[in-house]
Amino acid sequence: MELRAALVGCGAMSKAWLDAARNIPDLRIVGLADIAPDRARARAAEFALADVVIAGDVATLLAETRPDLLFDVVVPQARHAVVTAGLAAGCHVLSEKPMAETMAEAQDLVARAEAAGRIHAVVQNRRYLPQVRRIARALRSGVIGEVTSAHADFFLAPHFGGFREEMDHVLLLDMAIHGFDALRCMTGLDGRDVVCREWNPPSSWYRHGASAAAMFGLSNGALFTYRGSWCAPGLCTSWECAWRFVGSRGTLTWDGAEAIRIEVARPGPREGLFDPVEAVEPPPPAAEDRVGGHFGVLSDFVAAARGGRTPETAGRDNIRSLAMALGATASAREGRRVDIVI
């Protein structure tokens, strides 16, 4: 069954969306919109989309293309209006993250999608990486016992230009939310409360909140610490964070690239100060692992639109990742521990 999709927001991120979309069978892009229509025309030419409608706003795009799917790649402050318009037009909508600027807006979009009988899902592409899926299987198998703490470090120094360098809470809302969602995917745990400190170093080229440290209480009583900066030149981590999971029986680490390591306690006499440990091989990649972040998200979303299972990143679930990010920003702003409320 062919599905017709229109995309609104033709900035840099739209390239990854369109690149993934052209690899999904029977999915046809019928229109592109941007507040700068020339940018939409340039993106159409880049992807050889010769017959698509070019529009300057979402209302015109929807009226002229009548798509089945709407891909929302707009800046966060425009998201609620774009998703609302797409759902009202009968579309299933896939959005960039974050799914909303506030919890009230996120709750409204969840309610609108349910009332319309349509899917609203969010691009949280990290959870579709094969390594994340392997770690999720390892942790849920109990190989290191119950997770008692988790730790993620993120240190990079990208110069994006554009809206990111002007937005509030840039690290927590535009990047750390990926780590929070990956944490939820890998452990099956949600955030319950958070203490967060946020700052903008004097050397930062961002306007606000380029660095942060947060400690979350998780739903099983464990703690999750996140340390990050978007203005940390040198000795950078991967985009996926560097991870450590400590369990009641052992520890799992991931460098954010290929190296997953597991050591667990083994029976035997203590050697000096420490109990003996042994290395355990992580689960091998499985056929069901999604290949590629954006391709995995779009594939799940399109399959759901064709009658398959609800995508993992549907709004009703993804609001829990957003709640962690918004809880962290509230804690940083108010200087106190904040309960995370959905």
Image (cartoon, rainbow, N blue to C red):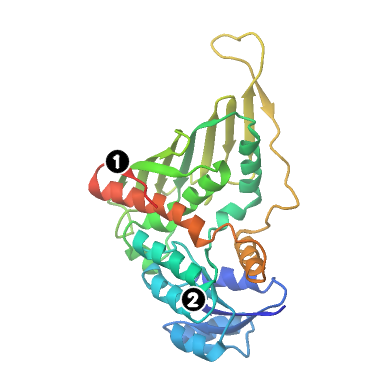
Whole-percent x and y of residue 253? Answer: 57, 36
Residue at 29% x, 46% y: name it.
Answer: 331
Which of the 4 image quadrants contains residue 139?
top right
Classed neighbour count for the residue bearing mark 1: other residues with Cα under 10 Å, few (<14), some (14–19), many (≥20): some
Whole-percent x and y of residue 168? Answer: 31, 60
What is the secondary structure assignment of the residue under circle 2? helix
What is the secondary structure assignment of the residue under circle 1? loop
100 over 74 or under it: above or below: above
Residue 9 visible at all? no
Residue at 57% x, 8% y: name it.
Answer: 272
Mark drawn on residue 80: none
Whole-percent x and y of residue 262? Answer: 63, 31
Image quarter in which the N terminus is found: bottom right
Amino acid bearing label 1: Arg
Question: Contact, CB < 8 Å: mark 2 with mark 1?
Answer: no
167 over 212 or under it: above or below: below
Which of the 4 image quadrants contains residue 26?
bottom right
137 over 294 or under it: above or below: above
State the residue in front, 296 or 279. 296
Mark drawn on residue 87: 2
Q: Nearer the viewer, mark 2 or mark 1?
A: 2
Whole-percent x and y of residue 41? Answer: 53, 86
Mark drawn on residue 337: 1
Q: Earlier in the sequence, mark 2 or mark 1?
A: 2
Which of the 4 image quadrants contains residue 162?
bottom left
Amino acid bearing label 2: Leu
- Residue 175 left/right relative to 117: left
Q: Kindly give the residue lying farthest to the right in the view shown.
A: 287
State the residue in front, 25 or 166. 25
